[in-house]
Amino acid sequence: MLHLLYILAFTILAFIAVANLIRNLIMFSFDRERTYPTKSSAMSNQGNFSYLSSRKQFIPHPELLDNAGNLIKEPLLVMRSINVDDARQQLDALYEASPGHKRENQEEA
Protein backbone atom coordinates (compact mmCIF):
# COMPACT_ATOMS: atom_id res chain seq x y z
CA MET A 1 0.00 0.00 0.00
CA LEU A 2 2.84 2.37 0.82
CA HIS A 3 4.41 1.66 -2.58
CA LEU A 4 1.23 2.77 -4.34
CA LEU A 5 1.20 5.97 -2.32
CA TYR A 6 4.81 6.72 -3.38
CA ILE A 7 4.00 5.99 -7.01
CA LEU A 8 0.95 8.26 -6.86
CA ALA A 9 2.90 11.08 -5.18
CA PHE A 10 5.78 10.96 -7.66
CA THR A 11 3.36 10.75 -10.60
CA ILE A 12 1.62 13.90 -9.39
CA LEU A 13 4.98 15.64 -8.92
CA ALA A 14 6.04 14.59 -12.43
CA PHE A 15 2.85 16.00 -13.94
CA ILE A 16 3.34 19.27 -12.05
CA ALA A 17 6.95 19.49 -13.24
CA VAL A 18 6.04 18.83 -16.88
CA ALA A 19 3.15 21.32 -16.73
CA ASN A 20 5.48 23.93 -15.23
CA LEU A 21 8.05 23.27 -17.96
CA ILE A 22 5.47 23.68 -20.71
CA ARG A 23 4.07 26.85 -19.09
CA ASN A 24 7.58 28.35 -18.83
CA LEU A 25 8.37 27.55 -22.46
CA ILE A 26 5.16 29.24 -23.57
CA MET A 27 5.83 32.28 -21.41
CA PHE A 28 9.40 32.58 -22.72
CA SER A 29 8.17 32.42 -26.31
CA PHE A 30 5.67 35.23 -25.62
CA ASP A 31 8.31 37.25 -23.79
CA ARG A 32 10.72 36.87 -26.69
CA GLU A 33 8.29 38.50 -29.11
CA ARG A 34 7.70 41.49 -26.83
CA THR A 35 9.68 44.65 -27.56
CA TYR A 36 11.08 46.75 -24.75
CA PRO A 37 12.05 50.42 -24.90
CA THR A 38 15.73 51.21 -24.75
CA LYS A 39 17.14 52.28 -21.40
CA SER A 40 18.00 55.78 -22.55
CA SER A 41 14.48 56.54 -23.79
CA ALA A 42 12.92 54.98 -20.68
CA MET A 43 15.10 57.07 -18.38
CA SER A 44 14.47 60.28 -20.28
CA ASN A 45 10.72 59.74 -19.94
CA GLN A 46 10.96 59.62 -16.16
CA GLY A 47 11.55 63.35 -15.73
CA ASN A 48 13.65 63.71 -12.58
CA PHE A 49 16.01 60.92 -13.51
CA SER A 50 17.05 62.26 -16.91
CA TYR A 51 20.50 63.06 -15.51
CA LEU A 52 21.18 59.31 -15.31
CA SER A 53 20.74 58.88 -19.06
CA SER A 54 23.11 61.75 -19.85
CA ARG A 55 25.82 60.40 -17.53
CA LYS A 56 25.43 56.78 -18.67
CA GLN A 57 27.44 56.06 -21.81
CA PHE A 58 29.00 52.98 -23.31
CA ILE A 59 32.45 52.29 -21.87
CA PRO A 60 34.02 49.11 -23.31
CA HIS A 61 36.07 46.74 -21.22
CA PRO A 62 39.84 47.36 -21.57
CA GLU A 63 40.39 43.87 -22.98
CA LEU A 64 38.16 44.78 -25.94
CA LEU A 65 40.49 47.63 -26.97
CA ASP A 66 43.69 47.41 -29.00
CA ASN A 67 46.91 49.30 -28.24
CA ALA A 68 45.60 52.48 -29.89
CA GLY A 69 42.37 52.41 -27.85
CA ASN A 70 40.14 51.37 -30.74
CA LEU A 71 37.41 48.75 -30.28
CA ILE A 72 38.41 45.29 -31.54
CA LYS A 73 35.95 43.95 -34.10
CA GLU A 74 37.55 40.57 -34.71
CA PRO A 75 37.15 37.34 -32.75
CA LEU A 76 39.03 37.30 -29.47
CA LEU A 77 39.71 33.59 -29.48
CA VAL A 78 41.25 32.09 -32.59
CA MET A 79 42.42 28.52 -32.34
CA ARG A 80 44.74 27.03 -34.87
CA SER A 81 45.43 23.39 -35.17
CA ILE A 82 48.97 22.14 -34.61
CA ASN A 83 50.32 18.66 -34.62
CA VAL A 84 51.30 16.74 -31.50
CA ASP A 85 55.05 17.16 -32.01
CA ASP A 86 54.82 20.96 -32.17
CA ALA A 87 52.63 21.05 -29.07
CA ARG A 88 55.06 18.79 -27.21
CA GLN A 89 58.01 20.99 -28.19
CA GLN A 90 56.21 24.11 -26.98
CA LEU A 91 55.30 22.45 -23.68
CA ASP A 92 58.86 21.21 -23.21
CA ALA A 93 60.20 24.71 -23.85
CA LEU A 94 57.80 26.14 -21.27
CA TYR A 95 58.77 23.47 -18.76
CA GLU A 96 62.49 24.04 -19.24
CA ALA A 97 62.05 27.80 -18.94
CA SER A 98 60.09 27.52 -15.69
CA PRO A 99 61.89 28.69 -12.53
CA GLY A 100 61.35 25.40 -10.64
CA HIS A 101 62.93 23.26 -13.35
CA LYS A 102 66.32 21.80 -12.44
CA ARG A 103 68.63 21.19 -15.35
CA GLU A 104 70.02 17.69 -15.72
CA ASN A 105 73.62 18.86 -15.71
CA GLN A 106 73.00 20.60 -12.37
CA GLU A 107 71.70 17.32 -10.91
CA GLU A 108 74.87 15.46 -11.95
CA ALA A 109 77.20 17.98 -10.25
Image: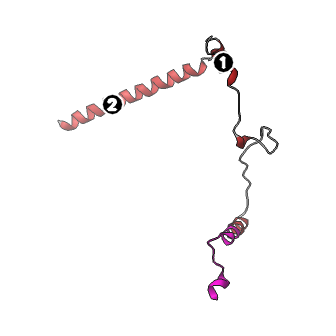
Res 38 visible: no
Whole-percent x and y of residue 63? Answer: 71, 43
How many neighbours does mark 2 have within 10 angstroms: few (below 14), some (14-19), or many (20 or more)?
Answer: few
Q: Amino acid at mark 2?
A: Leu
**Image quadrant assignment for residue 8:** top left
Going from N to C along the chain, the mark reached first, 2 or 1, is 2
Question: Which residue is drawn at the image coordinates 24% and 36% (left, top)?
Answer: 6
Residue that mark 2 sits on? 13
3D distance between C-alphas at marks 2 and 1 = 50 Å
Mark 2 touching mark 1, by CB under 8 A? no
Q: Which numbered circle lies on residue 88? A: none
The residue under the point 66% across, 18% down is 51
Q: Main secondary structure of the magenta part?
A: helix
Residue 2: image location, x then y, percent: 18, 37
Q: Residue at x 39, y 29 (%)?
A: 17
Q: Which residues are magenta?
A: 91-109
For mark 1, what is the residue?
51
